[in-house]
Image: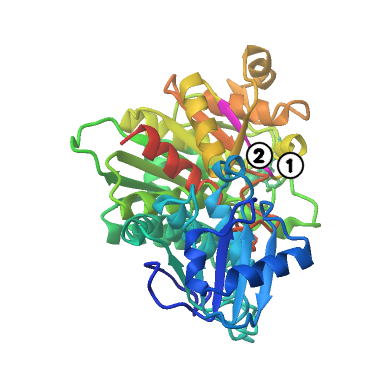
Amino acid sequence: MAQGFTVSYGSNDAGLQPVVLLFMGDTLALPDVAGRLGPEFPALFRSAAEGEGFKGKAGSALDLVAPQNVPAGRVIVIGTGSDADRAKINWTNLGGKLFAKLPAGRTASILLDIPGADAAAAADVALGLSLRAYGFEKYKTKKKSDEDAGLPGAVTLHLADHGAAKKQGKARDGLAEGIIIARDLVNEPPNVLTPTEFARRASQLQKLGVEIEILGEKEMRKIGMRALLGVGQGSAEESQVVIMRWNGAKNAKDAPVAFIGKGVVFDTGGISIKPAAGMEDMKGDMAGAACVVGLMHALASRKAKCNVIGAIGLVENMPDGKAQRPGDIVTSLSGQTIEIINTDAEGRLVLADVLWYVQDRFKPKFMVNLATLTGAILVALGQDYAGLFSNNDELAQRLFDSGKATGEKLWRLPMGPEYDKIIDSRFADVKNSGGRYAGSITAAQFLQRFVNDVPWAHLDIAGTGMAAPNSDINRSWGPGWGVRLLDRLVKDHYE
Ligand code: BES
Ligand code: MN
Ligand code: ZN
């Protein structure tokens, strides 16, 4: 996180910083708050706008350096387009865009009062600013100052309703922290982030009142989680399952909602070993579990009025003399036997046992799992949409809508018996790979055999959860994908 970077809220009369950002629509009529910049500002702005051909189009900016007789050293005017354009703005992304416009080492004021920007929009802008400020620098021994790193100083958001914005901003703080926790976990190298270290970090949620239970290999063996254990058996590191419980509903007996994450802290492929090129990326094969931890942080921080289970399966998939082989048959917690065709199709084995465990023990309203499950989802959807698979249209629609609202977008793919039969096994009840065709769908069919009719959705985040391209709100390898999406799902429908 950028050390010196903070966001605060101020009234429209509070003192201005040396750099001022001002918003306007596409009519070149300045908003009322522009009055703060003195009587000479409008004429100055008009002639500069004319000179630059600036028309206030959404996303455009006009930079006025050292404007005469204006109480700021620099004014950056940001276009937000027409009223219709403004209604479509994702304010969080806009916050990230603004961050990029702020000069290094300078404090700034953002005058936000324009039609369509309410307290919630201001809080979203603040969220975008702080998410964009995140960097994962802990292993760089040569530290740059914030200014040398191009980072701006503190920012004040000015608006009439600043009290309400501050309140809403507080609620967003836990969300920002949750996303940053998820990013840190995804970025962390695999020698540091072992299954036990991951479990230790998840346990920190106790401080927020989240109940934590950890199952080690001994406990898992006792109850029969042999699908998960098989994946970890070639690793020197002990596999772990972490159960997180947030009891926020009025009635402690309300059925919980449940989120389950794949946490393969490193995926070599095992005996079906992966090629060397790019294998280092497989430290991110725990992005699903990272999201669940970040989400639990966000929900507990804002004391969400809902009972929530988070469950993550943490393993390392290694080749070894003791490792699982193709051809092995394991008995899962559900009792179903699984023929291992490919030891690189390990995520579904981990999830099979955790999904079964969660539905059996907690009888949840629904289960949503997140997993960097298949390379095939990258082929189908690239890095902009996660794959959505579900046995329940209402849950799928709600997830889809939350995706639209937050910008963490989902695209639903089909499921059905014609795909399910592809994973029938010659020797066991099911096999863990159905071959190349429809690879993401057959992986989802596999998971569905372990959810026992509970409303369920699977998000394949192999494309969105790691190795993220730069975006407005993220410059880091681990985007913390899914925390905003699921926080929104809970907020809109389950509390
Ligand atoms: N962790 C990988 C999937 C993955 C690929 C995640 C690229 C992120 C980026 C998963 O465990 C895997 O190896 N899946 C195999 C399945 C196959 C063996 C049936 C795959 O996608 O090739
Ligand atoms: Mn794999
Ligand atoms: Zn994997």
Classify residue 460 as left or right of residue 437: left
- Most distant residue in the left direction: 251
Q: Residue at x 56, y 48 (%)?
A: 90
Q: Amino acid at mark 1?
A: Gly
Queried whether the magenta region covers residue 375, the answer comes back as no
Above or below for 226 versus 155: above
Estimate the x, y position of residue 60 in percent, counting from the top left.
70, 58
Main secondary structure of the magenta stretch: strand
The color scheme shown is rainbow
Classify residue 89 as left or right of residue 249: right
**Res 186 visible:** no
Q: Are marks 1 and 2 in contact (CB under 8 Å)?
A: yes
Q: What residue range appears in magenta?
A: 384-389
Q: Which mark is residue 47?
A: none
Queried whether the magenta region covers residue 386, the answer comes back as yes
- Most distant residue in the top direction: 417
Q: Residue at x 65, y 44 (%)?
A: 462
Give SS at disc 1.
Answer: loop
The residue carrying pointer 1 sits among few (fewer than 14), some (14 to 19) or many (20 or more) residues within 10 Å by Cα, namely some
Quarter of the image where the C terminus is located: top left
373 vs 101, nearest the viewer: 101
Estimate the x, y position of residue 214 in percent, counting from the top left.
36, 51
Estimate the x, y position of residue 49 in percent, counting from the top left.
71, 64
Q: Residue at x 62, y 43 (%)?
A: 85
252 vs 8, nearest the viewer: 8
Disc 2: which residue: 385
Q: Amino acid at mark 2?
A: Tyr
Q: Which mark is residue 382?
A: 1
